[in-house]
Image: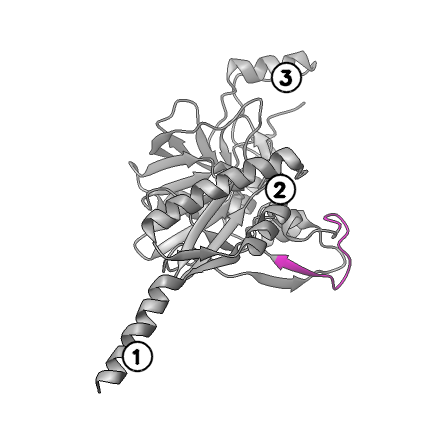
Amino acid sequence: MAFFRPGLIATWLLLTASPAFAEKVALPINGDLVGAMGTMATRYEDTFADIGSRNSIGYLELVHANPGVDPWLPGDGTQISLPQQHVLPDAPRDGIVINLAEFRLYYYTRDGVKTYPVGVGTEQNPSPLTQTEVTMRLESPAWYPPASVRAEYAASGEALPRVIPPGPENPLGPYALKLSAEGYLIHGTNKKFGIGMQVSHGCIRMYNEDIAELVYAVPKGTPVEFVNQPVKVGMRGNEVWLEIHRPKEEVDSNTKDMLWRRVMERMDSLLDAHPGVEFQRAAVEMAIDQADGVPRLVGERVRQMAQAADDTEASSTSL
């Protein structure tokens, strides 16, 4: 494989350094649910990879939110759901939070939160569950493959150089954020496919348009926390919302048992913080059966609402 083609570097930088769509607007935080679900009609040439890159949505997010639709040939005029609504992870709302289970990064700002799909480490080379921080912004980064990666390539009969310079064949893309966790980056990519999947050797991979925006917004010292939360429960007003991401493609009985345990743990924590909440079992069962990453309304805080009604009635009676 040829890794260095000087004549293509200038063109590559021009094409990858400028965002293809408008800067993301920070979503206002009012409770634990942000964003809104969207829909669109596909064009005849669309694939889920194309739609994901245009709308900053991960590949598997689209697949799970649109069961029965062919991700490579959805067809002309097919209505699909755009999963752009999220329950915020159970983590401090400060700096960057990366939820590996949903392949999504959250960046908290003074105006709210910006959220981006990401590719994460494979089972063989997982991303770390750790707390770290941003140490450096890298423009046109060179890639220095670690010895383990070079050995992996060598085992498949392919020699990998000790350094891959900037260019169209550099897997880090045009920008990267270096983390204090040794050997880990948040970076772009030279491949459109793979965002929203387990694809990396542990680093966090983003669409080039997204990292081009994020790299200049995040200052040095910004905290970064990695979490793994396939089940998220949150409140919006008196509403209870549940979002579940399947850890495996097939939701078998063992997976359902695991998800039920996670849901119960999250609900118990929510009840401690919000007494008076009641859950709708049928809605919870539906969320677990689907495990499609789409937030669902599964309950409400009824005791507080009942108390408020009693107080209103008592006030009216006294008049």
- Counting from the top left corner in percent of width and height, residue 307 is at 31, 68
Amino acid under disc 2: Lys
- Counting from the top left corner in percent of width and height, residue 238 is at 39, 62
Q: Quadrant of residue 201?
A: top right
Task: Classify mark 1: residues with Cα within 10 Å, few (<14), some (14-19) or many (20+).
Answer: few
Q: Is the Cβ of the residue at disc 1 closer than 8 Å to that at disc 2?
A: no
- Counting from the top left corner in percent of width and height, residue 277 is at 40, 56
Tell me if residue 266 comes above or below residue 159 in the rendering: below
Give, as a single range, the part of the protein colored magenta: 70-81
- Which label lies toward us, 3 or 1? 1
Q: Earlier in the sequence, mark 3 or mark 1?
A: 3
Closer to us: 11 or 295: 295
Residue position marked by numbered label 2 in the rendering: 192
Amino acid under disc 3: Tyr
Q: Quadrant of residue 179?
A: top left
Distance from Cα at disc 1 to Cα at disc 2: 59 Å
What type of secondary structure mainly makes up the magenta span? loop
Residue position marked by numbered label 1 in the rendering: 313
Amino acid under disc 1: Glu
Q: Earlier in the sequence, mark 2 or mark 3?
A: 3
Residue 275, visible in the rendered structure: yes
Closer to us: 257 or 296: 257
Residue 72 forms part of the magenta stretch: yes
The residue drawn where x is 76% and y is 58% is 44
| Secondary structure beneath label 1 | helix
- Counting from the top left corner in percent of width and height, residue 128 is at 45, 27
Distance from Cα at disc 3 to Cα at disc 1: 73 Å
Q: Is the Cβ of the residue at disc 2 closer than 8 Å to that at disc 3?
A: no
Residue position marked by numbered label 3 in the rendering: 153
Q: How is the image coloured?
A: one colour
The residue drawn where x is 66% and y is 39% is 251
Distance from Cα at disc 2 to Cα at disc 3: 21 Å
